Amino acid sequence: MLYSEKVMDHFRNPRNVGEIPDADGIGEVGNAKCGDIMKMYLKIDDGIITDVKFETFGCGSAIATSSMATELIKGKPLEEALTLTNQAVVEALDGLPAHKIHCSVLAEEAVRAAIKDYYDKNNIPYNPADFCDHDCEHCGAEH
Ligand code: FES
């Protein structure tokens, strides 16, 4: 079996799909490897992610990882959401085939971009290293 049951479940029945019209932070990222894009919307109250939704034109693995990522960060403080790695999402899904790991990067980066958007809009200071665009080892993208 190429895909785990959890991947198939989140792919067939993705959680938190859609748009939050009055989102506090929006992150849009593209995957350098395949060109697929992902948009993540966050509702933030007192530093806590109270709601999250995503839209993607990515593949099935991107849908499954985004769905799982939204479940992992919902109700969590921003600092905790920022530590979410694509590896953690892949583990929560019981793995992905090696050639699909790059798809999971989209979700992690979209979460990060949405939090950065929120910080920027509200003039909240942050450590730029948390949002480095050129951490190639981490995101696997070709710059
Ligand atoms: Fe593009 Fe999976 S092939 S996100």
Image: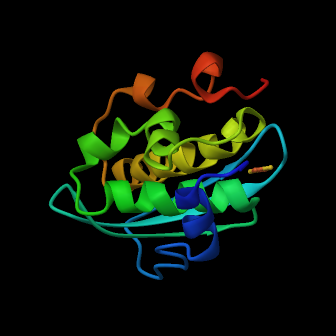
Residue 40 percent location from the top left of the image: 52, 62
Q: Position of residue 70 (x, y in %)?
A: 42, 61
Choose top left, top right, bottom left or bottom right for residue 72: bottom left
Residue visible at 47% across and 82% down in the picture? 21
Q: For this view, does 10 lie left or right of residue 59?
A: left
Q: Is residue 72 visible?
A: yes
**Relative vertical location of residue 16 with respect to residue 97 in this rendering, above or below:** below
Viewer-closest of 54 and 118: 54
Residue that sits furthest to the right in the current view:
34
Q: Residue at x 50, y 34 (%)?
A: 87
Side (left or right) of 134 relative to 50: right
Residue 81 placement, left or right of 17 = left
Q: Position of residue 19 (x, y in %)?
A: 53, 79
Q: Residue furthest left?
A: 46
The residue nearer to you, when weighing 120 against 112, is 112
Q: Is residue 123 left or right of residue 136?
A: left
Residue 19 vs 96, above or below: the answer is: below
Q: Residue at x 41, y 80 (%)?
A: 22
Q: Position of residue 18 (x, y in %)?
A: 55, 79
Residue 124 visible, this angle: no
Task: Give the colour scheme of this rendering.
Answer: rainbow
Which image quarter: residue 28?
A: bottom right
